[in-house]
Image (cartoon, coloured by chain):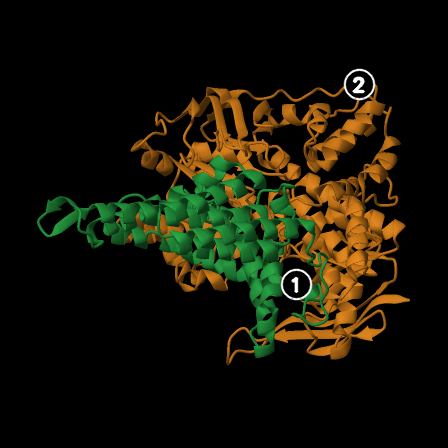
Amino acid sequence: MNSIVVKDVKYEYINRENEKPSEALNDISFVVKEGEFVAIVGRNGSGKSTLARHLNALLLPTAGTVCIFGKYTNAEDLIWEIRSQLGMVFQNPDNQIVATTVEEDVAFGPENLGIEPADIRRRIDESLEKVNMSKYLNHSPYMLSGGQKQRVAIAGVLAMEPKCLVLDEATSMLDPIGRNDVMKILKKLNIDEGITIVLITHHMDEAAQAQRVILIDEGKLVIEGSPRAVFAQTETIKKAGMDIPQVSSFYVSAVDAGIIQKDQMPVVLDESEDLFSKYCFLSKKHATLPKLDNNLLEKEKVIEVRDLSYIYMPDAPLEKQALTDVSLDVYKGEILGIIGHTGSGKSTLIQHLNGLLTPKSGSINVMGVVPMGKALKELRKKVGLIFQNPEDQLFEETVRKDIAFGLRKRGLSDLEIEERVTEAALTTGLPLEVLDKSPFELSGGQKRRVAIAGVIAMEPEVLVLDEPTAGLDPAGSAEIYQFLLKLRQERDTTIIIVSHTMEDIANYCDKVAVMDHGKLVLVGKTREVFNNKDFLSQIGLDVPQITELFYRLNKKDPHIRKDILTVEEAISELKRITMN
Amino acid sequence: MLKNITMGQYIPGNSIIHRADPRTKIIWTIFLMIGLFAAKNIFGYAMVIAMVGIILLVSDVPIAYTLRGLKPLFVILIITAAINVFTYPGDTVLVSLGVLKITLEGITQAIFIAIRLSLMVIIGSILTLTTTPISLTNGLETLMAPLKKIRVPVHEMAMMMSIALRFIPTLLEETDRIIKAQSSRGADFDTGNFLEKAKSFIPVLIPLFVSAFKRAEELATAMESRCYRGDINRTRLKELNYTKDDAKISIFLSIFFVVFILTKVFT
């Protein structure tokens, strides 16, 4: 039987009166069979969330039909039945939890269905068990981590005993551990309980774990098929603003370069390891390791953190030691990545850098400025801090005014403000015509640029960004990093990036600092840091997929380098070991 | 600043007060407050204070924590007390400053008012500290259920209240984050006169409202997709049930009120 039949669905919505309606979905058709695990991928604004909302009648198609377990969504009297059979989990964990305890929240769905209390109790226990959250029955959801909240949200849907689960970018706001936990649970539900899973995502490594992938762009279905078949059409995927997993991309480049024979494309790490193991033991020589250039050390030191400790709410029941004796040096013009779990102290550390928090113990020196009293203003001029999802802070009538906000506060002349706003817009790749629009009209990616432009316009010498690419699709993320690199090149700006995306850290950072439980546990050149794979695993951090692959190959054949950071490096190493 | 507010928080526990039915707690809270206003002399206040003290001890909530909830009230206490000191009519003049007179009656009245306000907050805090927001709203909803007959949207009001309670910590955290983010962008909240300071909060308030609306919309969608359709055909995980605990509390407090009324009549 089919779980979902979407037939020729069109969806138009009216942005403003007297304007031509925009088409979010354009003649899209596909089928999901019962018990399948399907990933729907597409860039920001491709229509995938609109599509998700059609699946349980939150939206009704302008034309065409959506049929869920044999019931059409436009039949009004069947809506509640459809919604109890097809449950949805949304993006933001905070905005879908209704109640103040985990138990009450999971009960919400069954209560709405009019289930008997004893039966609700059983359903709560069973669903929490399935998502490994039984321990948290009486917790307040507010105290849980993002991944845990999302698991509670899944349990809340499971308690309605649905046959199909649709997750609308439910992993996009989570850290790697949270994402991993959610993925594991989804797979288990799919295999053990036979629940149909529709995972909407722009993380291709998640899509790779599905049975089938549907790529949509501009409201149309572009390709569908097994992950392998879909990823093989690399060009089409890139055109749709998406990317393929590093191991697949490595395989494609290796075939294109004629280094290896065409074979089955690997889409996950294990497959890739099997494929490339063939090339072990070809070379008897170790690679000549590249010399790490140390010229950065000769540069001027811009930030010096010494023995910094910080405690939240000292002497209160919820007291929390957020930082313990952190010492760190940052040099002019370098790009430093800070990695670590949620709650490892990264945010606390960066908030010290522009004086939002002042050191309670230890010291900070930013180019001679010590964060105290009047000097705080001076410090904020030198260090620009951009929080996660900075677009949430936009508030002016026009983009121009919003970018100029900080400059105006600083009392610059109108002429200079105008100049700097234009320059910041150009740097961040904002088209100048959006300057007179309201920031609230822009797309998510453009809003983010506006917010970053607002800080760049103040020309800080150090730019600190917390998860600058969170929630952006691969193409959007790449653009952010491109202009950050340009900024460094043009102005020698020192850039500090906090991120969970190890591929980006490996690609763009000169140095990496690793935080764990409030301590700085490792700091060094990016290559050195990722070379400590075992240590990073111990504290639960990943390395880029390609690094992991070569690490595994190196275990088999020590002649293979294990300090590979990018696909390009992997290709040249593969060349070397296959050449002799 | 915001972390001092203890009213509205819930501290998990397993005391008799925690276990009692929310309806019992709401009703007796109301009676205690009425009693507080009925108390006119030192005996009356002493009795209510003793009662509140007993409840505090039995309820297992940290007393220091409860008292800390009075801190934000301090300014209001001082102001009301001051007004009473100077304006309450009395004959026993202690100090006279031109038109202003400080009388013994004024001072006693000021002290009583301060005690009354503090006790009100403490009584209210005990209710919220020992009752989860959900069971509090459940209790209110059930108590007010008769009003449904005259088309008062009791269920909707209760749901709104519980959602509001659920989002208080989330929005507090968000406010904190927006203030920090705008400070990083050059906003200044500390300098300038009152008007300038008020204006400087626009960059905080607009994003906060935008986000609150967005949250409201997303939450509504999530609730809809979990089959929420108001009060229609809805059951409850925890049906409210009176138990022995409620009987014990009610008997004890009834005796208290009988004694309270008797002393009032005979003094």
Question: Among all residues in the image, which is located at the extreme right?
Answer: A1
Q: Taking A353 as reference, is A381 left or right? A: left
Coordinates of residue B128 in the picture (x, y in percent):
54, 49
Residue A244 is at least partly visible in this image: no
Location of mark 2 (residue): A285
Chain with orange colouring: A
Q: Label 2 amino acid?
A: Lys
Q: Residues within 10 Å of mark 1 (few under 14, many from 20)?
A: some
Q: Taking A103 as reference, is A357 left or right? A: left
Q: Is residue A540 above or below residue A415?
A: above
The circle on residue B11 is none
Q: Secondary structure at mark 1?
A: helix
Residue depicted at 58% across the width and 42% down the height = B11
The circle on residue B223 is 1
Q: Taking A410 as reference, is A251 left or right? A: right
Q: Mark 2 and mark 1 in contact? Answer it, CB < 8 Å.
A: no
To which chain does the residue with label 1 belong? B
Coordinates of residue A288 in the picture (x, y in percent):
71, 19
Q: Label 1 amino acid?
A: Met
Coordinates of residue B246 in the picture (x, y in percent):
64, 52
Q: Quadrant of the N terminus of chain B?
A: top left
